């Protein structure tokens, strides 16, 4: 005999993949008033200073992972802080849920508060130590994490590239061309570079396992280079709108053949959920005369993210042999969603309404490797 688990009125999809998020910014989500560079000074950096305390790291890491699971996210690419303990706490907690996590220690050796800076040699040594301890353990992988070009010397970027090549499967995550003032700053700091992307390219950081968040203010040559290198862009629409950074050109990235995933970019992003993130991606694409198909929106939140992270052989769809990370979505999550989805006459329109309207109430359950790790009814 078999057990029947009747889930009529629900939709089982692959676990969501967040290709860019900052766990240490959980407590400053939705902070008012600034664009990127002031927002970093006023909110992000002060928040990250608290992670010198291991107890803070552990408490926030646990809350953050609960948020991921409650939103159906089963894979994430995460920035910790400059503190080694912030990475330890995150990996430790993720291992407990057997979550697929890519994460790394932030590297900064200039242009930021003294408390968050270290000489590049120390950042490299601590990164190497973390790689040794965590990279490749169960479902965990390490990402070299120079924050962005303005806070790294050229030596720090080059040493990150050396480490990136030191073990198979390592990643590089950073920010790229998010904000106009940031781009002007980078042009002044690296006058020899052709573009912001070229700063990373000259250091040897543009490769198949590189994930660049934002990539708003880039040109056709940059897009060609990203595609040729098989590098990925993380499209972070809630963050890009919240900070007024600009409109990511998804149609151009798609046409260039670049791997693109969605990123929540919390705490500059305003939602942990990939459905809400996909809804904002739809609106941004709509402004660029592109109608993101409902299934393409779901693709970006799942298999697209897996491809961006080069783990499409493991997760992102229900193909045979993949790991059973999944999320059960609820067409009756709220009276409005129930009413609207009942009034949709095919799967595409039902799915679209659910993505556009759904918050964490739409997640009935989340499964990691086939085990239920979150159940909305047992909160
Ligand atoms: N650029 C450099 N650091 C950050 C960060 O923490 N958040 C965002 N959105 N952009 C950045
Ligand atoms: Zn970010």
Image: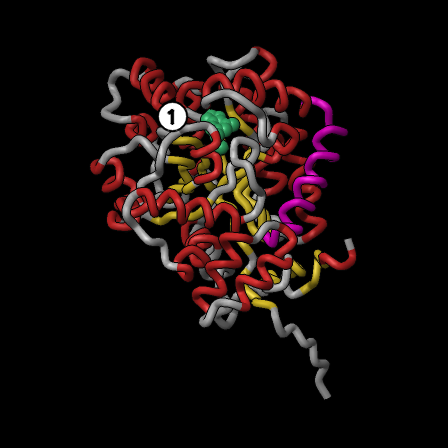
**Residue at image location 25% in from the left, 36% down from the top:** 222
User: Is residue 249 depicted above or below 84 in this figure?
Assistant: below
Q: Position of residue 200 (x, y in %)?
A: 34, 29
Question: Which SS class for mark 1?
Answer: loop
Q: How many marks?
A: 1
* Residue at x 60% of width, y 31% of height: 29
**Would you say 318 lies left or right of 374 here?**
left
Residue 227 x %, y %: 28, 45
The part of the image, by quadrant, that contains residue 79 is: top right
Task: Work out whether residue 108 or residue 181 is closer to the camera in this orientation and state it.
Answer: 181
Residue lying at the far top in this picture: please name it.
114
Q: Which region is colored magenta? A: 52-73
Q: Is residue 215 above or below residue 49?
A: below
**Quadrant including the N terminus:** bottom right
Of 2 and 377, nearer the camera is 377
Vertical side of 368 occupied by 112: above or below: above
Q: Is residue 71 left or right of residue 205?
A: right
Residue 183 found in image quarter: top left
The residue that label 1 is drawn on is 179
Q: Residue furthest left?
A: 221
Label 1 beta carbon less than 8 Å to ligand 1: yes
User: x, y percentage for residue 128?
Assistant: 55, 32
Does the magenta run of residues contain 118? no
> In the depicted view, which residue is nearer to us: 252 or 193?
252
Q: Main secondary structure of the magenta part?
A: helix
- Tell me if mark 1 has few (under 14), some (14-19) or many (20+) residues whose alpha carbon lies within 10 angstroms of its own: many
Q: Is residue 59 magenta?
A: yes
The answer to whether residue 304 is visible is yes
Q: In x, y percent, where is residue 372? A: 70, 62
């Amino acid at each position: 005999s078999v057990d029947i688990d009747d889930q009529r009125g629900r939709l089982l999809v692959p676990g969501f993949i967040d290709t860019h998020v900052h766990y240490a910014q959980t407590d400053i989500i939705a902070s008012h008033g600034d664009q990127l560079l002031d927002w970093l000074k006023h909110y992000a950096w002060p928040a990250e200073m608290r992670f010198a305390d291991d107890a803070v790291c552990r408490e926030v890491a646990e809350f953050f992972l609960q948020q991921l699971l409650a939103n159906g996210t089963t894979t994430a690419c995460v920035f910790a802080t400059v503190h080694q303990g912030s990475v330890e706490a995150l990996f430790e907690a993720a291992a407990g849920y057997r979550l697929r996590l890519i994460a790394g220690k932030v590297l900064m050796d200039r242009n930021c508060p003294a408390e968050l800076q270290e000489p590049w040699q120390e950042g490299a040594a601590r990164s190497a130590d973390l790689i040794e301890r965590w990279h490749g353990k169960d479902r965990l992988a390490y990402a070299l994490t120079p924050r962005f070009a303005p806070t790294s010397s050229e030596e720090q970027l080059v040493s990150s590239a050396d480490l990136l090549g030191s073990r198979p499967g390592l990643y590089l995550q950073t920010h790229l061309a998010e904000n106009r003032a940031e781009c002007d700053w980078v042009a002044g700091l690296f006058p020899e570079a052709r573009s912001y992307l070229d700063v990373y390219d000259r250091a040897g950081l543009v490769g198949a396992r590189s994930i660049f968040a934002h990539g708003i203010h880039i040109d056709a040559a940059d897009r060609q280079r990203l595609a040729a290198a098989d590098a990925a862009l993380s499209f972070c629409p809630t963050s890009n709108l919240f900070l007024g950074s600009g409109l990511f050109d998804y149609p151009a990235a798609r046409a260039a053949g670049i791997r693109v995933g969605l990123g929540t970019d919390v705490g500059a992003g305003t939602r942990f959920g990939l459905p809400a993130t996909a809804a904002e991606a739809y609106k941004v694409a709509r402004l660029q005369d592109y109608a993101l198909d409902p299934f393409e929106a779901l693709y970006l939140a799942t298999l697209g993210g897996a491809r961006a992270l080069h783990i499409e052989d493991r997760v992102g769809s229900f193909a045979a042999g993949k790991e059973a990370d999944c999320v059960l979505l609820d067409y009756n999550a709220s009276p409005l969603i129930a009413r609207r989805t009942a009034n949709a006459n095919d799967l595409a329109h039902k799915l679209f309404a659910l993505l556009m309207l759904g918050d964490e109430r739409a997640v009935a359950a989340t499964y990691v490797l086939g085990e239920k790790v979150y159940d909305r009814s047992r909160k």
